[in-house]
Amino acid sequence: MGTAQRLPQETGAWVVAHPGPVGASGPGPLVWERRPLTAPGPSEVLVEVEACGVCRTDLHLAEGDLAPRVARCTPGHEVVGRVRAAGSAVTGFELGNRVGVAWLAHTCGSCAYCRTGRENLCPRSLYTGWDRHGGYAEHVLADAHFAYPLPERPPAEELAPLLCAGIIGYRALERAELPPGGRLGIYGFGASAHLTAQLALARGARVDVFTRGEAARRLALELGAAFAGDSYDPPPEPLDAAILFAPAGELVPVALAALDRGGTLAVAGIHLSDIPVLDYRRHLFQERTLRSVTANTRADGQAYLAAAARTRPVVHVRRYPLRQADEALADLAADRVTGVAVLVPG
């Protein structure tokens, strides 16, 4: 399918001009700019953005925890939009189709990891909003092989968080190896955690939540958590598995100590502060396991989106106009967002 409609010459986008703290006095790291609209390559689709979720990874990019891999990078990797143009080699998408553009943007397809179903570990992988310009924009280009077909319902702002918060939470839950009917501990309760909790509950788990925010604890209980306490509270009973969503390394020993024998802690973030020294007998002995979570595969994305279509998770959205992306990131950094922030072009 080739380009078949007139396109604007320019598009608007936020770029990370000067990585640094968001919400500080003076110019922030994000700058709004106009730039030429690039036509899609043979295997690409050009997507007009309907909504883009605000992820903590975007915050790490803006503040310099993750070094940008492309000059004046546009963040955003939870993108819902419409196909407005496509390259000559694209199949499976038509103009006007709703699609999702997620974190994993490209893999080589030929390395040992790609050949064995572990494309999330591909050494030549590329990522939306880090290696390629992302969705804090009016338009975004995406490799059609890594775009997801999306339904017309629910609204775009409710679909957007599923594309990273949902997918990475799904992979973290798989990595945590929660047994059927087991007790799951969730540390931190933001965008990904509130979706993952609902997935675990739909599978018959008991969910305990540990987070510092009172509003987040209330939301956890509303969604069905059996317990919601402070980040450092002990669980009512030992946990069969746990997921750490908060980027706080000091919570790793806390979560490990809360595990029952044979339990697993999965760390879901791309960035984590330093982990304190672990006590082997208290934190790891009796076959407790500490695992990281690295990106996701397309199979993860397909599996989670199918599960979400069946379970229809409640997505707690706080909408921001696209032109207020800097404000959304500042609110995220200050823990003023309960649920997930989503940018919507005006």
Image (cartoon, grey):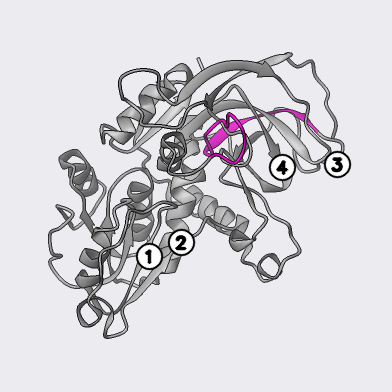
Q: CA distance from mark 1 to mark 3?
A: 39 Å
Sequence-earlier tag: 1 or 2: 1
| Of labels 1 and 3, the one closer to you | 1
Q: Which residue is mark 2?
A: 293
Q: CA distance from mark 2 to mark 3?
A: 33 Å
In the rendered structure, the answer to whether residue 33 lies left or right of residue 197 reads: right
Q: Residue at x 57, y 32 (%)?
A: 73
Are the residues at dot 2 and dot 4 in contact (C-beta closer than 8 Å)?
no
Q: Which residue is mark 4?
A: 143
Q: Which residue is mark 1?
A: 266
Sequence-earlier tag: 1 or 3: 3
Q: Which residue is mark 3?
A: 89
Q: CA distance from mark 1 to mark 4?
A: 29 Å
User: Which three-letter amino acid code belongs to the residue tagged 3?
Assistant: Ala
Instruction: Between residue 32 and residue 189, name the one nearer to us.
Output: 32
Write down the region rendered in magenta: 68-86
- The part of the image, by quadrant, that contains residue 292 is bottom left
Q: CA distance from mark 1 to mark 2?
A: 7 Å
In the rendered structure, the answer to whether residue 297 lies left or right of residue 21 reads: right
- 211 vs 282: above or below: above
In the rendered structure, the answer to whether residue 325 lies left or right of residue 214 reads: right
Sequence-earlier tag: 2 or 3: 3
Are the residues at dot 1 and dot 2 in contact (C-beta closer than 8 Å)?
yes
- 182 vs 30: above or below: below
Q: CA distance from mark 3 to mark 4?
A: 11 Å
- 8 vs 103: above or below: above
